[in-house]
Amino acid sequence: MNKKSFRQCQLFKLLSSEKEYRSSRYFSEILAVSTKTVYNDMNKLNEAMKEFDLFIEKKPSSGFLLIGEAKKRKLFEQYLLSLQEEKTDYFTTEDRQIDIVCNLLRSKKGILQEELEEKYYISDSTLRLDLEQIRGDHSMQFFSRNRGRICLKGDEASVQYLVKNYLMEKIPWSVIDLEQKSKVSRFFTEEEVSFAKESLKQVLILSNAVTSDYYMNSLFFFFLVFGIRVNHEFHYCHDVMSKEDLSMLETYFISYELTSFYREQFQLELTKKDIQAINEQLYANGIYLTLDPETIDPATEKTVDNILRNLGNLLKVDISDDVELKRSLMAHIPPMVFRLKRNMRIENPLLGEIKKQYLLLFSLLWYVLSDLEEQYDIRLNDDEISFLLIYFQVSLEKRHGVYFKNIVIVCPRGLSTSELLYTKVRGMIPMRDRVLTRTVEELHDLSLDDIDFIISTVYLEVEEVPVVYVSPLLTGADAIKIMDEYANQDNQYKSIALTSKSTIYKNIDTFIDEKYIFCKKNFSNKRECLDFLIEIYEKEGTVSEKFRQSVYDREAMGDTSIYTGVGIPHAAPETIQHTKISFVTLEKPIQWGANEVSFIVLLAISNKDVDLAREIIKKIFSMAEDKTVVERINRIETKIQLISAIRNEVFEQNR
């Protein structure tokens, strides 16, 4: 029975059961339609009942009453029932409201009000009641009437979030069965449901994850809504990745893999922000990469053991027995190798933030993972390194007590002042710690649960964490206050142990040779500079024939420049026979990746010196991130002065 006939049949049955006159409001409340719709349906019934000698009598101040013989009533009811179609066409008031939401979900320009009224055989007032109920009961503040059109209003993330939650409430999870039809099929096409099912199955295949029925249902409805919107050219407009919670990136490559699946199976193209949105849902619904015991490769396990041992030695932290970290790496590495061998690059949306905040760990991983590159004949890029870094970062902080402090700088006076203050503070704070910059407004939206202390140039109404107030120019007294607060932080966490200064300084004369130091050179571009330096290493016989290619492979995989104007190229340790570090200042800056640089440090650290690499890299990157030191070095005019500055500024030998 169509929706119109079904409702009129219900009205006729109500009229037949009444012995007294009833008002139009009485019928409208029972049928959940407007009184105008009741009047329209009564007029239609009167037209149809003429042949049956039946009619609806209207009595002023009393209401309506069906007039006619019982036998004729029975015949007319049978006539109405003969109009039946499939039972699935029956639409209750709730069904109609769900269907309205689903149709608006698919509409790019909105739907004319008259079209909805004709589709559901309802009046303007009934449609208005439907929209009010949807809005009121489910906080869906996104209906907008514009020149007679009704559409979903709001940013894409909000629209999808609200519709997904609405559908989950209206269509209980217990009726969702991936192998059978359910109530979902009443409102969505077979193709739409198939997209959601196949997406969910693909996620489970890629992750090997096992999750609860609730999360499965949540993901099903997310993909259902997401697929419809993408098919109708709706895309996410804002980044949804959290810079404060890098663990969200553990599932990012699964989200990225879905893009190829969608392209091949559904001819759909996703934006980077769409991928972020999928990743957020996977993370929120308990999806994470798990290891299938049947796929464990002994060679991969041995490689992971070596990585854990080598990085642990550099950090002076025993992570060799970290089972969870080991399993995560063993699950991640095989598909990573597969991607790299086929030149499939996955971009990390937080790469810049990771390199800025975890530069030391990022750089150490390059050296530790060189064996993995050699074993699988691959070349890691910055994005893949950053994804691997997340596992180590989470492990070090949460399971090994290696505490990386989180410090926030609040400065309301504009970008230039904020950057100046950040540069000075960054030069004081150890490289392992995170330093974030936020405005006062942004601070309100930032969770302070993991923040150790705040540095601010303005008064803040913050009680949860300590606040160190400083001037925008950061005086000497301000610096003392900051370091005092840093020293006062909870000592229950152990810091990464440092290699003794005597051990480092003993090797400085070996690592720094004036043959590899140049002052005020002129190069027209990065390649010219690298060729010059590589030829020096080759001429001195300190590197193998693979050194040149290794340097250029590293440059091709990611930017080795820093925003302070320093380029730090390097090569794989196995291509280096004797550790030598080259320092070059330039007469004029050249473009090096995303930055113009005037100071280049070429790191050539051999395998036998990798244990010392951590402290060497820490010193060099600490120098490179201090804009004041970099500017001072760039002003030097002679090689003798440059060598002295390197020993004093970089390695603090005379301090």
Image (tube, rainbow, N blue to C red):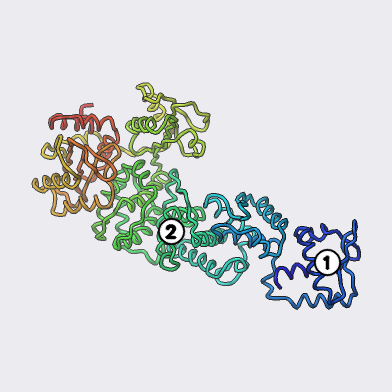
Residue 172 drawn above or below residue 559: below
Mark 1–mark 2 Cα distance, whole angstroms, equals 52 Å
Disc 1 secondary structure class:
helix
Residue at numbered disc 1: 14
Q: Quadrant of residue 515?
A: top left
Please indicate whether residue 168 sits to the left or right of residue 235 in the image. Answer: right
Q: Which mark is residue 270?
A: 2
The tally of labels here is 2
Residue at the image position 54 percent from the left and 67 percent from the top? 193
Give residue 410's mark. none
Is 89 placed above or below 126 here?
below
Mark 2 residue element: loop
Image coordinates of residue 451 in percent, x first then y, are 46, 36
Q: Is residue 360 visible?
A: yes
**In this view, 216 is above or below 322:** below
Q: Residues within 10 Å of mark 2 (few under 14, many from 20)?
A: some
Residue 192 vertical position relative to residue 318 in the rendered view, above or below: below
